[in-house]
Image: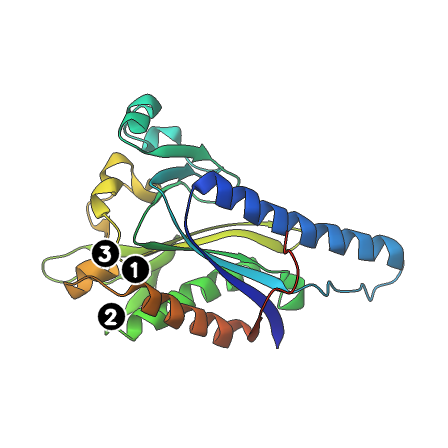
Amino acid sequence: MQQVIFQDLGRIAYREAWDYQSSLHRALIDEKTALRAAHGSGDTQLPQTQSPHQLLFCEHNPVFTLGKSGSADHLLLPEAELEALGFEFFRINRGGDITYHGPGQIVGYPIFDLERFFTDVHKYVRYLEEAVIRTIAEYGLRGIRLEKYTGVWLEPDSDLPYRKICAIGVHLSRWVSLHGFAFNVNTDLGHFDYIVPCGIDEDDKTVTSLSKELGQACDLNEVKSKLKSHYAQLFGLEFIMATQPTA
């Protein structure tokens, strides 16, 4: 079992959460760099980090974030107008295009040293998706993956197109993960109208939320608990309490 410190940051500004996860990410990378410098480059059995992994959950104030491979054209309003409406906007270093974060959405930031799990970025993304797929299955929904698109989707039916319920965008440095997923639970989907979500401008694809699919608001803490449990099962995690400052 891999030890992980779980923290629910609650509602938090995007910049504050970004700075915090970045500090945790940097600390784990610095530990890895120091270990390997002390061990010598000629040894093939490189030492592994010993500090616990980190898993952060939070909700953000309304914000749009644009990944390094995204297009600014997918932001449909001028930044000044967005600010007047109460939205923030950030260009960040994750993969993917533009997405929205806001209240009622579970945003997750796993800061994992993947060399202690597996060194396969595609498998890592599949695990992030799988945790959400298993969570929504507990509410009677069948989540699927679509070829060429990351995230978790729901299949179309006679009245509805493909619907994206969870977006994923990650960044890895020395196999330490940053950023993560955004799972729409009680999210205001109208806020997605100000962007081309994830750069996908196709008539047969849209966004959705757990509450929209179920026709009622969901207990966010209950969903978080289920999601956290599926992360533990998939990655083989043992949750521990922080005994000292984690940044």
Asked whether the viewer can see residue 206, the reply is yes
Q: Position of residue 80 (x, y in %)?
A: 33, 22
- In the image, is 109 to the left or to the right of 49? left
The local crowd at label 1, few if under 14, some if 14 to 19, many if 20 or more residues have their Cα within 10 Å, is: many
Using the numbered discs, state the Cα–Cα distance from disc 2 to disc 1 in whole angstroms: 10 Å
Residue bearing mark 3: 162
Using the numbered discs, state the Cα–Cα distance from disc 3 to disc 2 in whole angstroms: 13 Å
SS at mark 2 in the image: loop
Q: Position of residue 139 (x, y in %)?
A: 25, 73
Residue bearing mark 2: 141
Q: Amino acid at mark 1?
A: Trp
Query: What residue do we see at 50% from left, 42% from top?
Result: 16
Q: Amino acid at mark 2?
A: Leu
The local crowd at label 3, few if under 14, some if 14 to 19, many if 20 or more residues have their Cα within 10 Å, is: some
Residue bearing mark 1: 153
Query: What residue do we see at 44% from left, 44% from top?
Result: 96
- Above or below, 139 relative to 167: below
Marks 3 and 2: which is nearer the front? Answer: 2
Query: What residue do we see at 57% from left, 60% from top?
Result: 54
Q: Position of residue 18 (x, y in %)?
A: 51, 43
* Quadrant of the drawing holding the N terminus: bottom right
Q: Are marks 1 and 3 in contact (CB under 8 Å)?
A: yes
Nearest to the observer: residue 9 or residue 97: 9
- In the image, is 178 to the left or to the right of 229? right
